[in-house]
Image (cartoon, rainbow, N blue to C red):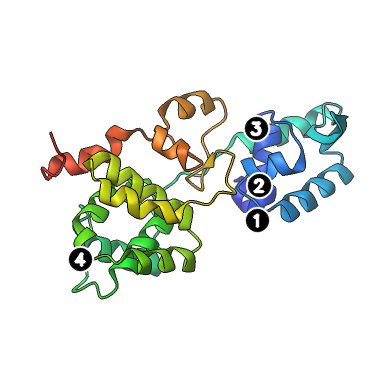
């Protein structure tokens, strides 16, 4: 329901953080947790303050935002109920997503779709697969298998360009290193190095639909160290990524 009533993704995520998770922080900190640009988050937070949805205090020289405890009780209850709601994360069904799944299937992903007849641009397919994985955990789970089976056809430089084109350089690097860890392959580990963004210092949710309120501790426990190293948290441990590889006998023993 929140997605229908609040069409701005940044505003929706900030409401979920402030009213669903009782988060508090500076505009920069909340922007990072919301996976949003600073300017967009700052603009939304200022608007929320004008409408008395948040309050601010100055702590250690920074302006800290938090849910307004003085808001009318009835309004506050509505906000909390909406902020706790989460859409079901079903597989995206747009045409682009279907085409990417079919291409990944042709690369060996065990997805329930008809495989593409051919994959002309492997690097682009892998990069777009990573972008789709942000919306589809099933695709995320099988991507290491795709990276591994396509490794002899991949040009690392072209993959880096493709990753930049879809704005997922850090995430593609994460999947390269994740595959290297699972398959004990130092070559893929070397490929991953140029993908790292030195400006990333805070963890952010990998998946577009964040964890439900109250589950953050469990998510932090399940997040693999390799994901943390690339600045991501996810409710998916290494075993989830290893399982598709084990089913086809690709994991080293």
* Residue topped by disc 2: 12
Q: List x then y, in percent, for residue 172.
A: 40, 54
Identify which residue is drawn at 80% across, 35% down: 65
Write the residue at 81% across / 38% down. 53
Residue 141 appears at what percent x and percent y? 31, 45
Q: Is residue 180 visible?
A: yes
The residue indicated by pointer 3 is 20
Callouts 2 and 1 close, C-beta under 8 Å: yes
Q: Nearer the viewer, residue 71 or 14?
A: 14
Q: In this figure, which residue is indicated by the disc labeled 1?
A: 7
Q: Residues within 10 Å of mark 3 (few under 14, many from 20)?
A: many
Left or right side of 191 for 15: right
Along the viewing direction, whichever of 216 and 164 lies nearer the viewer: 164
| Cα distance in 3D space between marks 2 and 1 | 7 Å
Badge 4 marks a residue whose secondary structure is loop
Residue 31: quarter of image: top right
Residue 135 visible in this rendered orientation of the protein: no
Q: Position of residue 162 (x, y in %)?
A: 41, 68
For label 1, count other residues whose C-alpha is less than 10 Å away and answer few (under 14), some (14-19) or many (20+). Answer: few
Q: Sort mark 4 into few (<14), some (14-19) or many (20+) by Cα contacts within 10 Å.
A: many
Work out whether mark 3 precedes mark 1 in sequence or the reverse, and give the earlier one.
1
Q: Position of residue 83 (x, y in %)?
A: 64, 37
The residue where tag 4 is placed is 115
Q: Is residue 42 left or right of residue 83?
A: right
- Of circles 1 and 4, which is in front? 4
């Amino acid at each position: 329901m929140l997605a229908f009533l609040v069409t701005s993704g940044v505003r929706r995520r900030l409401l979920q953080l402030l009213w669903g998770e009782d988060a508090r922080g500076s505009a920069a900190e909340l922007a990072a947790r919301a996976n949003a640009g600073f300017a967009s988050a700052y603009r939304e937070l200022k608007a929320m303050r004008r409408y008395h949805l948040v309050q601010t205090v100055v702590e250690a020289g920074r302006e800290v935002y938090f849910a307004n405890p003085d808001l009318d009780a009835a309004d506050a209850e509505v906000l909390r109920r909406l902020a706790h709601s989460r859409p079901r994360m079903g597989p995206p069904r747009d045409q682009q997503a279907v085409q990417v799944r079919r291409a990944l299937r042709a690369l060996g992903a065990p997805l329930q779709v008809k495989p593409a007849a051919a994959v002309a641009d492997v690097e682009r397919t892998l990069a777009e697969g990573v972008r789709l994985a942000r919306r589809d955990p099933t695709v995320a789970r099988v991507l290491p298998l795709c990276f591994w089976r396509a490794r002899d056809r991949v040009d690392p430089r072209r993959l880096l360009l493709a990753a930049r084109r879809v704005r997922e350089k850090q995430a593609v690097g994460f999947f390269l290193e994740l595959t290297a860890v699972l398959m004990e392959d130092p070559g893929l580990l070397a490929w991953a190095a140029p993908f790292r963004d030195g400006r990333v210092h805070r963890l952010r949710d990998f998946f577009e639909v964040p964890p439900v309120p109250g589950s953050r501790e469990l998510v932090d426990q399940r997040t693999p160290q390799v994901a943390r190293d690339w600045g991501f948290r996810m409710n998916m441990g290494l075993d989830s990524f290893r399982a598709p590889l084990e089913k086809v006998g690709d994991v080293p023993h």
